Image (cartoon, rainbow, N blue to C red):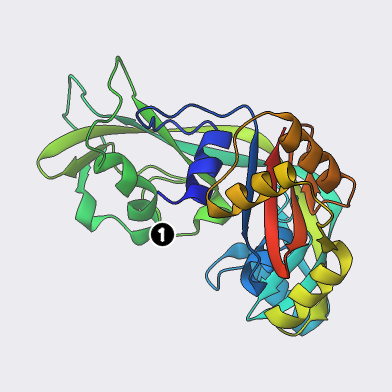
Amino acid sequence: MNRRSLLAALATGAATVLAGCGHPSVVLDLNEATDDDVADEVSMNADPDSEEYDVVASAIENGTATRRGRYELFDRTDTVRVDGAFYEVTETRVASSEVTVYEVLLDLDPEDTTPELGEIAFDDLPETDRKRLERIVTEADPPLGDGYDIGVDYGSAEEVGNDSVFVPDREYDVLVYEGERYRVAVESRTAPEAEYRYEASEVAPDVETFADRVRDRYLFVLAGLSDAEREVVEESIDGAYFEDDDAFRSVVDRIRDHDAIREDDFDGTWLLEYEGAAYLAYVEW
């Protein structure tokens, strides 16, 4: 596990516990600020097979796009990378309604495996069902208890499409996977839904141009440090600095005097230059 991944895991309270590692009370971590790293801090990359990509590509081609859904796509950032270019995307809620959503329930250790509707082998399921259920049936140590053990959110009938054998109409109530027999049920409920309108305008044709824009906005020079402060910074480049001492506090105060790419109550990310090199600085205080 690299140090950026380790810090992220610690910061988010990941379930995996590393021997001898606890969450440090403070952190200063400096990493080389490549064009891609800088861009990733302030934008999202829309994968070609994602809903985000489809919406933005449609807005680019047609001037606007619409979508119905139960959540916003771009609640964390409005800058989206599509096919190498960067776009500012507006997401406007234009109407609200309700929709029926479905959850497929699996009893992984049923007392009675005799089907009432019918049984189907996992390999014979349509792709839409296999994709949603594969993680459950292949799990090495699934949760077991009385009744149905786990539920899988399928979403609305429109989101599922016409191929499912469980949603909206259940055709089978027993699923067979590698000799194991699971009972299947389906529950439905009403959930809020909205219609969104999207517009996209290009802000940069490539990652180099976009990263330069971000640098122009956020990059500052960290200089004039004492020997103790320099030790803090240089240790944070070689690994990370975890000591809550006067030198650390002084460096953090210097950094926080400048605009952050992102800043919350107790942590944030800045873009700085030190000794002629640019770094993304992650700080917890």
Q: Residue at x 57, y 40 (%)?
A: 101
Is 47 on the left-hand or right-hand side of 201? left
Residue tagged 1: 163
Q: Is residue 25 above or below residue 202?
A: above
Q: Residue at x 79, y 32 (%)?
A: 265
x then y, percent, for residue 198: 81, 66
Furthest residue to the left? 179
Furthest residue to the top? 146
Question: In the figure, residue 116 lies in which quadrant?
Answer: top left
Is 133 on the left-hand or right-hand side of 245? left
Front position in the image: 30 or 73: 30
Instruction: Give the structural element (helix, strand or loop) at label 1.
Output: loop
Q: Is residue 164 above or below residue 12?
A: below
Front position in the image: 209 or 179: 209
x then y, percent, for residue 137: 26, 41
Q: Residues within 10 Å of mark 1 (few under 14, many from 20)?
A: few
Front position in the image: 17 or 279: 279
Callout 1, which amino acid? Asp
Q: Residue at x 49, y 48 (%)?
A: 3
**Which quarter of the rendered picture does the C terminus lie within?**
top right
Residue 172 visible from this viewpoint: yes
